[in-house]
Image (cartoon, grey):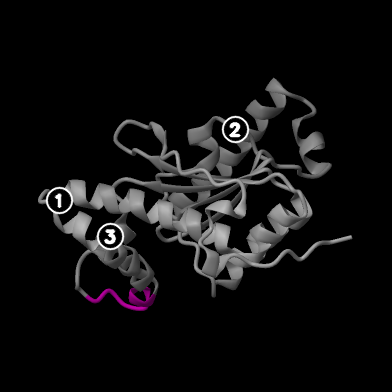
């Protein structure tokens, strides 16, 4: 077990050497600051690394990850990342990325107690309840899980559009698009769910906020 831990440092040295050989100024440029165009809200699953599956470099994507890529309006961690991304970094695209075979989604489909995470999974169960008729009509449990993964991403995109952070940015003329993607672990393909939102016209009236214009 200790050797596994030490291997991380050996891997790091190798990566630094290879990266520096390919681009001697890489770390100098990286240390000058970040200006990512993307905020990535993804799952904590270790098999879904944002940079690797999008072919991007450190500094290209600002990342927030949690179990089942959730946007929960009482989650101060997520909201803080969202606010910093929009109002300080000025990201142009906010991506919610789920993945098929998500353990959090599968757990939420059952009734077995897991522990503290049960409170988190309840938000995914709410998504199931919203789409219960459609999901219960799918007899294959794997296909039902895949569909819930997609529906969950769609709901998180909608929840992002409901936030005052995103709505105020739109009101002030800031370009922001919110996208929903699903990653297929079985083949490595990233799929666009075509649920992009770029203004509050797609936000239901009850969630639409009055403009809070910044001079």
Indicate which label's residue lies in the foreground, 1 or 2: 1
* Residue 99 seen by the camera: yes
Q: Earlier in the sequence, mark 3 or mark 2?
A: 2
Per the image, label 1 sits on a secondary structure element best described as loop
Residue 65: x percent and y percent?
51, 56
Residue 73: x percent and y percent?
54, 71
Q: Which residues are magenta?
A: 113-119
Give the answer, above or below, for where 28 lies relative to 97. above
Q: Earlier in the sequence, mark 1 or mark 2?
A: 2
Res 56 label: 2
Q: Which residue carries the number 3 mark?
A: 131
Q: Disc 1 versus disc 2: distance between alpha carbons?
A: 36 Å
Q: Quadrant of the N terminus?
A: bottom left
* Residue 1 seen by the camera: no
Q: Residue at x 29, y 35 (%)?
A: 186
Residue 197: say if magenta: no
Q: Residue at x 68, y 43 (%)?
A: 92
Q: Which residue carries the number 1 mark?
A: 138
Q: Residue at x 62, y 37 (%)?
A: 13
> Quick check: 131 left or right of 182?
left
């Amino acid at each position: 077990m200790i050797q596994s831990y030490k291997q991380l440092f050996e891997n790091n040295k190798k990566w630094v050497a290879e990266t520096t050989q390919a681009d001697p100024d890489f770390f100098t440029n990286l240390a000058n600051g970040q200006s990512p165009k993307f905020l990535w809200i993804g799952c904590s699953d270790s098999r879904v690394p944002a940079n690797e599956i999008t072919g991007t470099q450190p500094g290209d994507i600002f990342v927030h990850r949690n179990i089942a890529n959730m946007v929960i309006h009482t989650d101060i961690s997520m909201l803080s990342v969202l606010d910093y991304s929009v109002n300080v970094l000025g990201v142009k695209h906010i991506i919610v990325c789920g993945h098929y075979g998500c353990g959090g989604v599968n757990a939420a489909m059952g009734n077995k107690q897991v522990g503290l995470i049960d409170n988190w999974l309840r938000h995914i169960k709410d998504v199931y309840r919203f789409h219960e008729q459609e999901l219960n009509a799918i007899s294959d449990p794997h296909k039902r899980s895949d569909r819930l993964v997609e529906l969950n991403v769609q709901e998180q995109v909608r929840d992002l559009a409901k936030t005052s952070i995103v709505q105020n940015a739109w009101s002030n003329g800031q370009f922001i698009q919110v996208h929903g993607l699903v990653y297929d672990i079985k083949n490595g393909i990233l799929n666009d769910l075509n649920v992009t939102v770029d203004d509050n016209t797609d936000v239901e009236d009850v969630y639409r906020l009055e403009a809070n214009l910044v001079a």
